[in-house]
């Protein structure tokens, strides 16, 4: 992203922020109402970041675009070479292949995910996990081995209405435009896109640098994520 990150949070509605958290590396933009603990306000002001009641994004238009994109991604054929090694999902990279699509209807069945590079430059690839189901739980398993690839991973959940993330660190960006997302002791190394969020989740700023092969991808990531 070029320039400074002005806002860490942009909300199309109201924000009700409880204790035991922090907002750093940016301010807050909201449209309706806001409730922040004093220590959060003081920290934002100390870093000379704004707290603005302002409309920045047409969320209805964005949601339509994101829903369309998510559905197109979900229709991509699975093309990754994968094996199940005693409960560990192993993904083999192939020289010359740029995009890897994994159909992951039940990703929680695995206790780990490993990528074998096989001489492939990881900066030139994009990995897509298409998550199935309307109610998804990501809980109590470890994919820390994917951290190196987080800026090139998308977890796409086009049919999800609810996603519960507990004791789990998502490596990559989550695209779930119609899902109400709940977090409990969770973390995401990427960008979180959902219909609504409630709970306790740390979002670390890890931009998406991959390239998804659909007709809408470039305009989406340029417009929404600022690349």
Image: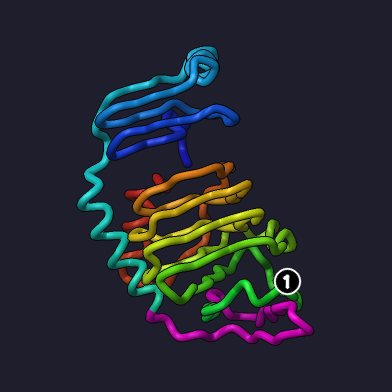
In the rendered view, would you say 2 is above or below 149? above
**For residue 7, which quarter of the picture?**
top left
**For residue 159, which quarter of the picture?**
bottom left
- List x then y, in percent, for residue 204: 59, 42
Left or right: 223 in relation to 6: left
Please tell me which residue lies in front, 155 or 140.
Answer: 140
Element assignment for label 1: loop
In the rendered view, would you say 25 is above or below 108? above
Left or right: 162 in relation to 82: left
- List x then y, in percent, for residue 148: 70, 58
- List x then y, in percent, for residue 158: 38, 69
What segment is highlighted magenta in the picture?
75-100
- List x then y, in percent, for residue 95: 66, 81
Q: How many marks?
A: 1
**For residue 84, which quarter of the picture?**
bottom right
Asked if residue 24 shows in the view, the reply is no
In the rendered view, would you say 42 is above or below 200? above
Please tell me which residue lies in front, 16 or 142.
Answer: 16
User: Residue, x 31% and y 65% (percent of image)?
Assistant: 216
Mark 1 closeness class: few <14, some 14–19, many ≥20 residues within 10 Å: some
Q: Is residue 99 magenta?
A: yes
Please tell me which residue lies in front, 70 or 157.
Answer: 157
User: In the displayed image of the protein, which residue is found farthest to the right?
Assistant: 86
The residue pinned by badge 1 equals: 111
Q: Is residue 19 magenta?
A: no
User: Residue, x 26% and y 31% (percent of image)?
Assistant: 31
User: Residue, x 70% and y 71% (percent of image)?
Assistant: 113
Colouring: rainbow
User: Residue, x 40% and y 31% (percent of image)?
Assistant: 16
Asked if residue 148 shows in the view, the reply is yes
């Amino acid at each position: 992203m070029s320039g400074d990150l002005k806002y860490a949070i942009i909300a199309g509605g109201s924000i009700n922020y409880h204790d035991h958290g922090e907002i750093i590396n940016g301010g807050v933009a909201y449209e309706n109402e806001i409730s922040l603990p004093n220590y959060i306000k003081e920290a934002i002001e100390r870093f000379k970041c704004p707290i603005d009641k302002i409309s920045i994004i047409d969320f209805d238009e964005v949601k339509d675009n994101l829903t369309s994109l998510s559905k197109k991604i979900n229709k991509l054929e699975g093309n990754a070479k994968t094996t199940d090694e005693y409960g560990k999902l192993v993904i083999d990279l192939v020289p010359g292949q740029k995009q890897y699509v994994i159909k992951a209807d039940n990703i929680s069945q695995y206790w780990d995910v490993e990528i074998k590079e096989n001489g492939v430059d990881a900066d030139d690839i994009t990995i897509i996990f298409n998550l199935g189901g309307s109610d998804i739980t990501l809980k109590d398993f470890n994919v820390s081995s994917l951290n190196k690839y987080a800026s090139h991973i998308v977890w796409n959940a086009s049919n999800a209405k609810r996603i519960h993330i507990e004791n789990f660190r998502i490596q990559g960006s989550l695209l779930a435009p119609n899902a109400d997302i709940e977090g409990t002791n969770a973390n995401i190394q990427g960008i979180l896109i959902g219909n609504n969020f409630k709970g306790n989740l740390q979002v670390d700023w890890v931009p998406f640098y991959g390239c998804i092969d659909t007709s809408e991808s470039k305009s989406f990531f340029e417009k929404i994520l600022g690349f």
